[in-house]
Image (spheres, coloured by chain):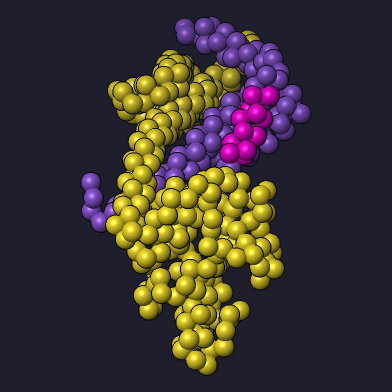
Chain colours: A yellow, B purple
């Protein structure tokens, strides 16, 4: 008799528990079913994450099986949750491998374009009759107390513009060639202006010009991590700003070349 | 009339709870998954990473109380939370790489002046 009462109380509590969970449980199972249905029909997902799709199916089946028992609400929700997660993980992996395939294709495209750009620039130099057949790469660089520095003068940019003119091609190509022969060296590209106009705008212009040089080097195949870009604006003039000649000298981009180990001096 | 089987089932269910073995292997797997997600850069910004860390903490607490069934459930969920967080972070990174590469290609095409 006592046993029956105990059993009755247990039954009641289990029914209550089951009742509470089932409403929510059904919803969780329905969500998991929907997610599983979406991934199992998707060939991209099946191709990149077959194991996760299988596990999503297995855990979903367990949740469905358990949902017909009383008092298993917690387990139903648990397995439905796991199934949902497996489906989500499978989907993410599929997206990831699609992205990686796209990246590989784009990387090839970029290499092709880099080559085309280099050839186009070489051609323009040959047409200008400027190209010198040099076995040893000599840079138009000068040794200073800061190390090896190459200067791109003011004439290589139009006033107020950031794009390099075609007349800079020869210097830039030489630098590219030099960096390819010396793969451990890095450079710091520094922009400078004269003191005409707003100081903040000058700072921005100097940085944008330095960045334009860096972008071109990257376009020609130099890795971005070998390049550092700084804008100094009006600071560190080479000449006095009183004359037009002095100001022209101050408007420049300097390319500081690192030592053999890739180490650059401190910033100014 | 239905009482005896249900009673038996209820007792079985209870017995099942009590006899759950300690999920040491699952705890190890979960800890590893959380660490791996963290290693690729998943942090509190990723919702699933927060869940993974909270559930792992719960599972560890349940382990201490010898409540192995709960410990296993939380640990299993936390493992998948962490794996999802990891996959999301990797995806975000690859998306960023794609954007950068596309920008570079656009710039190259512009430089080439519409050359094919």
Q: Residue at x 50, y 47 (%)?
A: A135
Compared with residue B33, is residue B44 higher up or lower down, i.e. above or below?
below
Q: Within the magenta stretch, is there residue A151?
A: no
Compared with residue B67, is residue B45 higher up or lower down, i.e. above or below?
below
Instruction: Give the camera-side residue of A215 and A43.
Output: A215
Q: Is residue B103 left or right of residue A74?
A: left
Q: Is residue A4 left or right of residue A175?
A: right
Q: Position of residue A44 (x, y in %)?
A: 33, 26
Compared with residue A246, is residue B65 higher up or lower down, i.e. above or below?
above
Residue A27: which quarter of the image?
top left
Residue A131: which quarter of the image?
bottom left
Q: Residue at x 33, y 59 (%)?
A: A129
Instruction: Give the camera-side residue of A54 and B91.
Output: B91
Q: Residue at x 69, y 15 (%)?
A: B21
Q: Main secondary structure of the magenta part?
A: helix
Instruction: Give the camera-side residue of A160 and B31.
Output: A160
Q: Position of residue B103 (x, y in %)?
A: 37, 52
Q: Is residue B27 left or right of residue A31?
A: right
Residue that extends furthest to the right in the rendered view of this protein: B64
Q: Within the magenta stretch, is there residue B30?
A: yes
In this picture, which residue range is highlighted in magenta? B28-40
Residue that extends furthest to the bottom in the rendered view of this protein: A242
Q: How many marks?
A: 0
Q: Position of residue A18 (x, y in %)?
A: 49, 25
Q: Quadrant of the N terminus of chain A?
A: top right
Q: Quadrant of the C terminus of chain A?
A: bottom right
Instruction: Give the camera-side residue of A122 and B53.
Output: A122
Instruction: Work out whether residue B2 can be spotted.
Output: yes
Q: Position of residue A92 (x, y in %)?
A: 43, 33
Q: Residue at x 48, y 43 (%)?
A: B93
Instruction: Work out whether residue A223 can be spotted.
Output: no
């Amino acid at each position: 008799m006592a046993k029956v009462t105990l059993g009755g109380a247990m039954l009641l509590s289990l029914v209550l528990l089951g009742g509470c969970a089932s409403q929510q449980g059904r919803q969780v199972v329905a969500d998991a079913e929907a997610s599983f249905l979406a991934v199992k029909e998707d060939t991209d997902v099946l191709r990149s994450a077959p194991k996760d799709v299988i596990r999503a199916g297995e855990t979903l089946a367990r949740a469905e099986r358990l949902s017909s028992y009383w008092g298993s609400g917690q387990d139903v929700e648990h397995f439905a949750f796991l199934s949902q997660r497996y489906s989500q993980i499978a989907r993410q992996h599929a997206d990831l491998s699609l992205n990686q395939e796209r990246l590989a294709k784009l990387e090839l495209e970029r290499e092709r374009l880099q080559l085309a750009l280099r050839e186009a620039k070489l051609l323009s130099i040959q047409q200008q009759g400027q190209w010198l057949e040099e076995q040893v790469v000599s840079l138009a660089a000068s040794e200073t107390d800061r190390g090896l520095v190459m200067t791109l003068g003011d004439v290589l940019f139009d006033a107020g513009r950031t794009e390099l003119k075609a007349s800079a091609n020869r210097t830039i190509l030489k630098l590219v060639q030099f960096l390819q022969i010396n793969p451990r060296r890095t450079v710091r590209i520094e922009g400078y202006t004269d003191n005409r106009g707003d100081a903040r705008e000058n700072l921005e212009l100097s940085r944008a010009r330095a960045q334009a040089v860096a972008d071109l080097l990257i376009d020609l195949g130099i890795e971005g991590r070998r390049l550092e870009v700084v804008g100094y604006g009006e600071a560190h003039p080479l000449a006095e700003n009183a004359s037009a000649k002095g100001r022209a000298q101050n408007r420049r981009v300097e390319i500081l070349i690192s030592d053999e180990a890739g180490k650059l001096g401190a910033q100014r | 009339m239905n009482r005896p089987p249900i009673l038996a089932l209820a007792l079985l269910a209870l017995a099942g709870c009590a006899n759950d073995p300690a999920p040491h292997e699952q705890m190890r797997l979960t800890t590893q998954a959380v660490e791996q997600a963290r290693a690729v850069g998943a942090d509190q910004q990723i919702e699933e990473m927060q869940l993974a860390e909270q559930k792992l903490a719960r599972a560890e607490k349940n382990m201490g109380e010898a409540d192995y069934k709960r410990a296993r459930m939380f640990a299993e969920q936390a493992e998948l939370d962490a794996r999802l967080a990891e996959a999301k972070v990797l995806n975000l990174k690859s998306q960023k790489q794609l954007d950068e590469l596309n920008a570079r290609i656009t710039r190259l095409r512009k430089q080439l002046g519409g050359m094919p």
